[in-house]
Structure formats: C-alpha cells, structure tokens
C-alpha cells in the first residue's frame, strides 16, 4: 500500500535551535497515526512542514501523493488542518459557519448549503444548526470545527490537540467523530497531549523526542517495550510486607519491587492468570491479608516515560 504521508530525514533549525534532526515518518492510508512527544520535541514543526506551512532545511516529504515543496498547491487541495482551538465564528449559527467555509472553498451557494447540511447531520449537529455557535458546548464547537475542515473532503486531516480543555463527555463525542472520518477513508495525523487519547484513537503511534522519532508501533507494541505484565499486591499490615515479598518471589520466580511506605509489591509475570491464582492462594494460606491485588499491563504513559524520560506530554 502506498503511504499517504512520507517524511525522510527532515531537518529544521531555528538559528541555534534544532527543531528536527532527521525526522522520519510513514503513515499508511485510512488510519489515525498518533504523534506524541514532550514540549519542544518537534511535533508542531513536523506538522507545519507536512501541511506546507513551513519550509525545511533538508530531507524529503510527500503528503497525499504530492511533494510538499515542489507541489505545495496540490498538497493543500488534498489536506485539512484543524488547530487546537475551534476556528468558528461565534456570531454565526452552525449552519452559517459551514456555508461560509464552503463559499470560501469555492463552492457555489447551493452546493455550499447542501454540503453544510450533510456535515451537520454527519456530526450530530442538525438540531443545533440554527443556534449561534457561541451557545454551543465545547464538544459541539470542536465537532463543528471538524466539520468545517471536511468541506472539501480531504484525503488527510491534521488534528492538533483536538480535545484540549474538553470534559470527558465532549472528548468522547470528538473521538466518535474522528473514528467516523477514518471509517470513511480519511487519514488522520493526530498530535495530542493526552496519552489516553492516543491509546483510544491511534492505530499506530510515533514517539518524537529531540527532533526525531525514537519509537514507533501500535499502542500495544509500545507498551510491550516495558516487558511483561505486573502482579501488584498491597498488603494490609506493614509488618507482613517482607513475608509477602518472600512468598511472591518463591511463587513467581521474580524479585518484587517493594514500596514499604505504601505496603505495595510489584513483580513481572508471564502467565497472568496462573500467577494471580497462585499468589492469592499462597497469601491466604500464609494468613497475609491484602488491601488490593491485581495484574496490570504497562500503560502508554509508562511507555512514554520509558522512551523519553519525561513524565507527561505537553502541547
């Protein structure tokens, strides 16, 4: 399958600051590809280059089959870019906003109105079509913003921090809208500060640090870099932590990581069900009471920390 987005060895320097240092990216058609990285990693610079908004110093980039430098006009005709904040006019209704965007994109009045109605229905905004955009909730505004980006049916949509500041319900609304786009064939390059969002939406993720991609794969593949599942036990009595550590070590064959203050023990396990069952029985027979016990898989947050040394992603 021909990739929809290709970047090879991109370099970009701002005076003494290196923004991109050999940035490589390949995105197949029809998926959400997440772009994660700490503040200053180069995510925004990469998106601006791929969307033809910024020149680069060296390398090569193609989007939707066109070179971003030699054929920037064609790239712009085939993409859409939705920024962090909704670019809608608060004084206009939802429908008026979409008709306006349609006219700005060169659609005739009738075609603009028809396209506006199609998008309002697609994003669940038909009942609110006549209301002023200033009265929309955060989630509705973001859906309206997404709708405006699709006036010309882009092959590629660049989504920059699509749910920043939204409540959980509004975030879910936007996530559903993004999934709907991909189901119809749109390729989405997503930058986000929410690791949960990337985990929910992205089929593949590229982790960016110091201007280059340091890891890439599915969310599960990135999590697997941390190794096996972990059995976690919280002992109710502080005086039994050492006893519990010894018992867990004998059963699992691993050396538990012990947090004495929290009375918490963690140990890697291979067969999660067998290990959990054996440890539960062992603790019961030893008379060790637990406050909590379970098997946890590594999270994307932990994988990100492992790969970049940063605690969180920033915009």
Image (cartoon, rainbow, N blue to C red):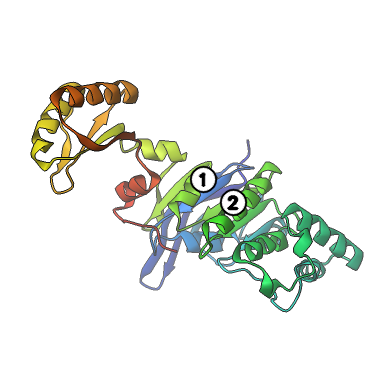
Point out the image quarter for the C terminus. bottom left
Q: Is residue 271 above or below residue 258?
A: above
Query: What is the CA distance from the residue labelled 1 to the residue labelled 2?
Result: 8 Å
The residue under the point 18% across, 40% down is: 236
Residue bearing mark 2? 175
Element type at mark 2 = helix
The residue under the point 38% across, 59% down is: 38
Horizontal relation, residue 209 to residue 79: left or right:
left
Element type at mark 1 = helix
Where residue 299 sits in the image (x, y, percent)? 37, 43
Where residue 259 sits in the image (x, y, percent)? 16, 44
Where residue 106 sits in the image (x, y, percent)? 83, 67
- Marks 1,2: beta carbons within 8 A: yes
The residue under the point 42% across, 50% down is: 207
Q: Which one is nearer the viewer's eye here, 166 or 116?
A: 166
Residue bearing mark 1? 200
Instruction: Choose top left, top right, bottom left or bottom right for residue 107.
Output: bottom right
Residue 302 visible in rendering: yes
The residue under the point 13% across, 45% down is: 260
Horizontal relation, residue 285 to residue 132: left or right:
left
Instruction: Choose top left, top right, bottom left or bottom right for residue 210.
Output: bottom left
Q: Which one is nearer the viewer's eye here, 47 or 244?
A: 244
Q: Residues within 10 Å of mark 1 (few under 14, many from 20)?
A: few
Instruction: Choose top left, top right, bottom left or bottom right for residue 271.
Output: top left
In the current view of this chain or complex, which residue is farthest to the right?
110
Labels in figure, total = 2
Q: Is residue 220 above or below residue 209?
A: above
In the current view of this chain or complex, which residue is farthest to the bottom?
91
Where residue 141 sits in the image (x, y, percent)? 65, 66
Residue 52 visible in rendering: no
Q: Residues within 10 Å of mark 2 (few under 14, many from 20)?
A: some
């Amino acid at each position: 399958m021909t990739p929809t987005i290709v970047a090879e060895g991109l370099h970009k320097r701002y005076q003494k600051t290196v923004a991109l240092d050999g940035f490589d990216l390949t995105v197949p058609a029809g998926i959400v590809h997440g772009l994660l990285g700490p503040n200053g990693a180069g995510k925004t610079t990469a998106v601006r280059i791929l969307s033809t908004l910024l020149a680069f110093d060296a390398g090569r980039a193609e989007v939707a089959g066109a070179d971003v430098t030699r054929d920037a006009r064609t790239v712009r005709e085939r993409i859409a870019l939705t920024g962090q904040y909704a670019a809608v006019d608060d004084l206009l209704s939802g429908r008026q906003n979409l008709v306006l965007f349609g006219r700005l994109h060169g659609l005739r009045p009738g075609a603009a109105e028809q396209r506006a109605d199609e998008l309002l229905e697609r994003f669940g905004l038909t009942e609110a079509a006549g209301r002023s955009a200033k009265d929309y909730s955060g989630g509705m505004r973001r859906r309206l913003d997404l709708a405006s980006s699709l006036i010309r049916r882009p092959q590629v949509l660049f989504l920059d921090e699509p749910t920043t500041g939204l409540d959980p319900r509004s975030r879910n609304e936007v996530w559903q809208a993004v999934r709907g786009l991909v189901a119809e064939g749109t390729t989405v390059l997503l930058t986000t500060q929410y690791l949960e969002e990337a985990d929910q939406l992205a089929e593949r993720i590229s982790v960016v640090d110091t201007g280059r991609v340091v890891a890439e794969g599915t969310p599960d593949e990135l999590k697997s870099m941390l190794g096996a599942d972990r059995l976690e036990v919280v002992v109710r009595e502080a005086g039994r932590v050492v006893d519990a550590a010894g018992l867990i070590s004998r059963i699992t064959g691993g050396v538990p990581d012990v947090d004495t203050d929290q009375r918490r023990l963690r140990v890697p396990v291979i067969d999660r069900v067998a290990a959990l069952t054996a440890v539960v029985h062992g603790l019961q027979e030893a008379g060790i009471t637990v406050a909590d016990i379970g098997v946890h898989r590594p999270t994307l947050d932990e994988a990100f920390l492992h790969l970049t040394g940063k605690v969180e992603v920033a915009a």
